[in-house]
């Protein structure tokens, strides 16, 4: 993707991060530009501009114009903000003026390419709300597929909305997703707490073809993968998850020793998961402390998966490994997950951070 680029890197003192501070950099910023020659012939020939200012603001630009960075209107350019939630990274696009995504799934694949594009696990669109909700969130994975929901993605989405709307303090809003209604709430410390709704346990709704063995659910069921019988519990958090604490009859799983790139795809594409599946491999430290690695459907190994962490706690409770309030360690950092008995909802709390602001020619 990024075979030609202009990088704006204003060297100013750290200040508050705000989209209002990132005005039309090319027009107003006095900072020097690094100009790279445009490729003359390539199927990936795109122009890509990055404002490398995740923890810096542009004082001169902010005084020169109140125009938001994302309000710039340049034909053929997509303005975006890259966020991450514990290393699970996304390209956020302001799509509030249309119910159709500004990029196609095929373009999303190129944008997510970590060598020739921006690099991300997915592209997320902030769209107009429907059915009485404040906003709609859609996402294209790095392989172009569209998942129902993404837990880390919705935290990034929430922070993006706060920046777009210039909201201050504690706020919550309703978001329509493919998994239904999601309600994120910005906390006083800047973290995002999300009501992820009720877990779906009915086997046919997850969906999985594994036969139900506990009421209508699949709990500690046998699943043969490449000659090894794994004990699995199936949960949907609006998207399908297969959670395993290890092979049947085995000792506590040591997740850091897993060859995830080898075993993950075999779970994802297993015939018992008609919609494919996300897979979480879990190590138990204590009834309130779990560790997981994830193979995400459509994205592969990622540093974090919010819906996966939620599914892990639900599965841990069902299998008797943990209580309902747990810290879940992921490669990118910890999430706090609570499965409340009072309302049967799962609540996820964790961070979301800006990485950089940029523009790319489509």
Image (spheres, helix red, strand yellow):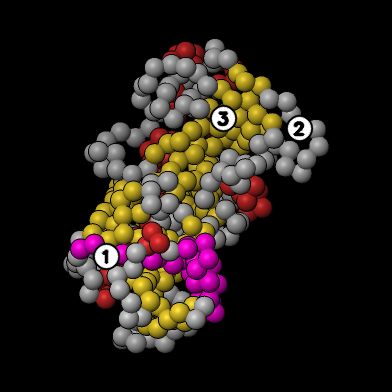
Task: Name the residue: 44% across, 26% down.
Answer: 20
Q: Which mark is residue 50?
A: 3
Mark 1 and mark 3: span between their CA atoms? Answer: 41 Å
Label 2 secondary element: loop
Question: Image quadrant for the N terminus?
Answer: top right
The answer to whether the residue labelled 3 contacts the one labelled 2, judged by CB atoms less than 8 Å apart, is: no
Instruction: Say how many tags the image has.
Output: 3
* In this view, 247 is above or below 132: below
Q: Position of residue 222 (x, y in %)?
A: 40, 83
- Return the disc, 2 or 1, that comes first in the chain's sequence: 2
Magenta stretch in the rendered image: 259-286
The answer to whether the residue labelled 2 contacts the one labelled 1, judged by CB atoms less than 8 Å apart, is: no
Snapshot quadrant of residue 79? top right
**Which residue is denoted by mark 1 in the rendering?**
284
Instruction: Look at the image and say whether residue 296 sits in the magenta stretch.
Output: no
Label 1 secondary element: strand
- Return the disc, 1 or 3, that comes first in the chain's sequence: 3
Task: Name the residue: 50% across, 68% down.
Answer: 263
Mark 2 and mark 1: span between their CA atoms? Answer: 51 Å
């Amino acid at each position: 993707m990024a075979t030609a680029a202009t990088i704006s890197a204003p060297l100013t003192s750290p200040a508050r991060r705000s989209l209002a501070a990132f005005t039309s950099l090319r027009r107003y910023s006095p900072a020097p530009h690094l100009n790279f020659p445009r490729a003359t012939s390539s199927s990936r020939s795109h122009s890509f501009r990055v404002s490398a200012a995740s923890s810096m603001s542009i004082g001169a630009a902010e005084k020169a114009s109140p125009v938001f960075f994302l309000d710039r209107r340049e034909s053929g350019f997509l303005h975006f903000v890259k966020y991450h939630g514990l290393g699970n990274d996304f390209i956020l696009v302001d799509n509030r003026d249309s119910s159709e995504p500004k990029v196609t799934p095929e373009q999303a694949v190129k944008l997510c390419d970590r060598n020739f594009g921006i690099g991300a696990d997915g592209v997320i669109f902030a769209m107009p709300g429907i059915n009485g909700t404040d906003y709609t969130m859609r996402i294209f994975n790095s392989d172009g597929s569209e998942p129902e929901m993404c837990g880390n993605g919705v935290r990034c989405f929430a922070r993006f909305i706060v920046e777009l709307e210039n909201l201050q303090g504690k706020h919550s809003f309703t978001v329509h997703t493919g998994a239904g209604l999601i309600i994120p709430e910005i906390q006083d410390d800047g973290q995002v707490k999300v009501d992820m709704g009720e877990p779906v346990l009915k086997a046919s709704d997850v969906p999985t073809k594994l036969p139900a063995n506990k009421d209508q659910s699949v709990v500690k069921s046998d699943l043969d993968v490449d000659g090894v019988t794994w004990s699995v519990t199936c949960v949907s958090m609006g998207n399908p998850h297969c959670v395993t604490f290890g092979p049947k009859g085995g000792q506590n799983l040591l997740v850091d020793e897993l060859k995830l790139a080898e075993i993950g795809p075999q779970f994802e594409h297993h015939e018992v998961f008609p919609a494919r599946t996300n897979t979480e491999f879990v190590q138990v430290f204590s009834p309130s402390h779990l560790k997981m690695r994830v193979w995400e459907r459509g994205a592969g190994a990622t540093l974090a998966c919010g819906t996966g962490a939620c599914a892990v706690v639900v599965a841990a409770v069902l299998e008797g490994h943990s209580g309902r309030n747990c810290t879940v360690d992921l490669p990118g950092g910890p999430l706090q997950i609570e499965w409340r008995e009072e309302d049967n909802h799962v609540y996820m709390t964790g961070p979301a951070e800006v990485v950089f602001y940029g523009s790319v020619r489509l």
